[in-house]
Every structure is written in structure tokens, then in C-alpha cells.
Amino acid sequence: MATLYTQRDSNVQKTWLLMSVFLVLIVGVGWIFSRAYGSPGILWFAVLFSSITSIASYWYSDKIVFAITRAQPIKEQDNRELFHLVENLCIASGLPLPKIYIMPESQPNAFATGRNQNHAAIAVTAGLLQKLGKPELEGVIAHELSHIKNKDTLLQTVVVVLVGIVAILADLFLRMSWRGRSSDNENNSTGAIVAVLALVAAILAPVAATLIQLAISRKREFLADASGALMTRYPEGLARALAKISADTSPMRAANSSTAHLFIASPFKGKQQTSWFAKLFMTHPPVEERIKALNVLSV
């Protein structure tokens, strides 16, 4: 049976496993293309690029996420109420105070990021601060602090960068394959291989992104909900917040498929599907199920 402590250890193990899988995947694709083109340089490029970006994703992925979401850091004097709310919850949970960011978005939403508790940050949208009451906002912040405490943020944030790496390399190899196909008339068999690999590369990016998002278990959201409710001792606050967030139809300009799994709720408003097949590919559990679980805790 999974506990908070086994889940934290599992998240660290999953992080290193995913980074290793990405390294093997990228090197493997580079090797196939180097054979197809007869150019060892492609393989060495793939090895070097994947090694550097895997290391960079560990140390700098949070900064990349902030750049994608356009979140801006704030100081205590910018929003004392928010700072004091976060500070009080950190004291109650024994966590260091994370950096606090605000996204200029009207949609109510939030996420946490960072490689560990001492290098963590919480980002909330301007819409979240405007549309939620204090108990609801407290529930959302507690949820995000739980992600930090459960070491979800390391796994979540590294995935954002690694998914992007696969997409970039797949697109690069796809473009190379089409150019190679049009100019390579000397060896028809090589041209056929390149054509097949071009199709594989074209499929690789979306498939890899989906599989990795699925690797981030949806159970971590239920775990963070439960941990957050335990932190505030008021599950109803988070339940009401989730209901308001899911009902709000405001779009998010910075919504991105590579960062969607970071948020407390999907930023793609009006695009969710509820068929059994669509649920297999959702980055978050249905909000109704999360609210139901929280209502059980409040009984």
C-alpha cells in the first residue's frame, strides 16, 4: 500500500528512470538516422544533445517552465496576504518558504515546481487570487505545497523539458529525412528507410509526450488533495476551489501541452472529453472524482 513516504521515494526513482529512458530513446533514434544517412555525426550530436539537456532539465527546468508560463516573481510587499498565507502553511507543514510567482492570467489555476524543498516555487494566476475566497485559496496553496513535500515537483518539472527535447529532435530528424529523401537518388533502399523513419519521427513527438504524461501517475493528484486537506484540516475549502476552477471558462493564453500536467487543473478549458478512452489520456483525474474523495474526508 502506497504511503506519503513511499510515494516520495518512488517519485525520485521515476525521475532518474525517465531521464535514462529519454537518453536511450534519443540516442536510439540518432543511431537509426546515422545509419540511414551514413553519417556518424548524427549519432554523436544526439548523444551530446541528450546528455546536456538531461542535465540542464534537472537544474534549470523550473526556470524554463516560468518562461513558458510567463510567471513573474513577487516579493512580500507586492502581496502580503498571499505571502502570509503561504508562510503559515509552510510553518504548519515544516516546509521552507518557497518562492512565489504570479501569472498574468484570468483563469484561476496554480502549480508548484522545483527540484527539492529548498529550491521550490509556487505560481498562482491573477484570476485565482481574484475569484477564490481565503479558505479556497488556502486549499489550493496547501495542495501545491503537498506536491513539494511529496517530491512530485521534481518529476513533474523534469518531464516538461524532456518532452520538449523529444519533440524538437523528432521535428529535426523529420526535416532532415525529407531533404535526404529528395536529394538521395543513389540508393533506393536507403531512401525507403529514410522515408519510413521520417514517419516514425513524425509520430514520435506526440506519442512520447502522451506516454510520459501518463507516466506521471494521476494518483499523485489524489495524494496531493488528501495531503493538502490534512494540512488545512478543511477539505471543503479545496473541494470548493476545484469546483470553481473547473466551472470557470476563462482561457489561459500560456496553456501548453507540455506544462498542462503541472497545474492543479487542466488549463485547456472547454476541451476536456469524458469518454472512457479520453480518460486514459487525461493528465488529471476528473474533478468530480477529486471532489467526491475530498467530501469523504470531510465526513
Image (cartoon, rainbow, N blue to C red):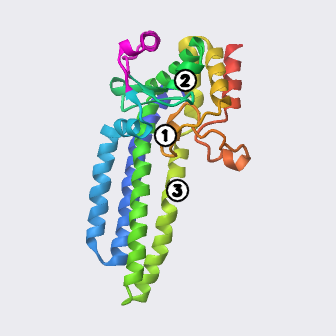
Residue 13 shows in this picture: no
Q: Residue furthest right?
A: 275
Decide: few, some or many residues near mark 2? Use Cα within 10 Å; few <14, some 14-19, many ≥20.
Answer: many
Q: Is the stretch drawn in magenta largely helix, strand or loop?
A: helix
Residue at image position (38%, 43%) is 16
Q: Considering only vertical position in the picture, is 260 above or below 186?
A: above
Left or right for 96, reference 248? left
Label number found at residue 206: 3
What residue is disc 1 on? 254
Label number found at residue 128: 2
Q: Quadrant of residue 154?
A: top left
Residue 3 shows in this picture: yes
Q: Considering only vertical position in the picture, is 25 above or below 135?
A: below
**Magenta residues?**
73-99
Residue 165, x across and y down, in percent = 39, 53
Q: Considering only vertical position in the picture, is 189 above or below 40?
A: below
Q: Quadrant of residue 135?
A: top right
Residue 127, x across and y down, in percent = 55, 25
